[in-house]
Image: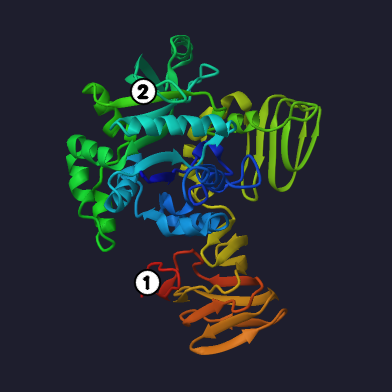
Amino acid sequence: MTNRYAVILCGGSGTRLWPLSRTLRPKQLLALNGEQTLLQQTAKRLAQRVEPAHLFTVTHEDHKFEVKGQLAELFPQAIEHVLAEPCARNTLPAIAWATYQIYEQDENAIIGVFASDHAIDNEEAFLNAWQTAELVAEQDYLVLLGIKPHEPATGYGYIRPSQLLPIKGTLSVHQVEQFVEKPDLEKAKQFVSDGYLWNSGMFVFKASTFMRMLEQYQPEIYKQLCTVNPQNLAEIYAQFPSLSMDYGLAEELVKDSEKLAVVPVDMAWSDLGSWDSIYARHGKDASNNVTHGEVLSLDTKNSLIWAESGVLAILGLDNIVAIQTADATLICDRSRSEDIKSLVAVVKALKPALTEIHQTVIRPWGSYTVLEERANFKIKRIIVNPGAKLSMQMHQHRSEHWVVVSGTATIINNEIEYTLQENQSTYIPKTHLHRLANNTSEPLSIIEVQCGEYVGEDDIVRFDDKYGRLITK
């Protein structure tokens, strides 16, 4: 019996969904079209055909703990196979690394590769296409799922299918003739008329087939991959070229008329790559608006109005996107939402922190929210999960004042251990070795006031850490 596996690609920053999606909390970790995050929706969808223990997820080191936490809410077995990239190297190295892990266990495994940030409304059609793709993969093909387009979209790459393959399945299967980059509108119209498919970035293949193709077309990646171990991962990974799966492997197969196939499918799919696509997938009110959070709108129509913090009031506008977070607000014409990436580049140059982090930052032990920050002080609200603790650490440039808002804090302050209850406080001078822990079954909430000549997050010397983060002493 052939074992089935699935690889979830959980990388990328989703800059076109700024200011909600940011580098340290990108769109796949957000709930944009339901109660669950896009990652959780993907894992739940794949678990209909794959055992949770056979789910492999590739993410960046910065997102490892939140990815594990989100998967643990659904499938605790899946967190054993969360692979954290030390640096981003595009989709081919990520897929190759995960495939190699599976190949070492089962070289004949059938593997499906899927992005973590896509929305699929017709899951039955998706599952049927996946099943058909597996039948083709059994015959040593690399198989793609191609989306039947419902409009001449300019935000997707296209696949040109050719002759039908004589393979029985629930859906037809075609040889791939050509890949085409994102076109302009006129070309997109022609592609749709000529039967081209959107490139979804979903692949199905046999582990042994992939490794053979990788060795043939990317021999250096193959050689380096075969030497990877936990001790040299960062060094080897940094040497991988930044290559997409399409460019580094699939297009090479097209050139050689190798075994590359596509299964056309209509499954109400979107990569949720822009605010306009988010608008399209939500229910509308009587004015054809999509609203989220505390929104007040008057004489406004055909708009996406999204408030994550505070009240967002809109008057007399049409066809706009308005997104409000605690520290940034975006307002644009809805037809220009594909161009937000250019705006984010300007923001990154002038205010880089606004593209990297939110005021609330997730940590493996809980979270912190920056309430106010100036040149020589910072105020935070810190939440420590039950049974969690921060690293043993010290700061060279700041002191800290802690006030317990709720729960019980266990504190080490220069080797003295004590506990604080609600409405009690303590002072941590700079250079003092210290640690904050929650040894109870209830969340701990504290207010932290930092004072000093420098209050940046990198002023930390870490001596011991429960979560395996870098020790800096």
Q: Which three-letter amino acid code belongs to the residue tagged 1?
A: Ile
Place residue 468 in its image quadrant. bottom left
Q: Residue furthest front?
A: 1
Quick one: 172 or 279, which is closer to the camera? 172
How far apart marks 1 and 2 lie (CA) works out to: 54 Å
Query: Residue 209: x, y in percent?
Result: 26, 37
Q: Is residue 418 visible?
A: yes
Q: Give the secondary structure at mark 1.
A: loop
Q: Which residue bears the numbered disc 2? A: 167
Instruction: Locate the N terminus by quadrant.
Output: top left
Residue 356 vertical position relative to residue 444 in the rendered view, above or below: above
Which class describes the residues within 10 Å of circle 2: few (<14), some (14-19), or many (20+)? some
Residue 61 vertical position relative to residue 40 in the rendered view, above or below: below
Q: Which residue bears the numbered disc 1? A: 471
Q: What residue appears at the point 56 percent right and 77 percent down from the top-left corner?
A: 437
Relative horizontal placement of residue 333, taking residue 248 as reference (left or right): right
Query: Residue 257: x, y in percent?
Result: 24, 21
Instruction: Locate the C terminus by quadrant.
Output: bottom left
Q: What residue appears at the point 53 percent right and 24 percent down from the top-left corner?
A: 266
Which class describes the residues within 10 Å of circle 1: few (<14), some (14-19), or many (20+)? few
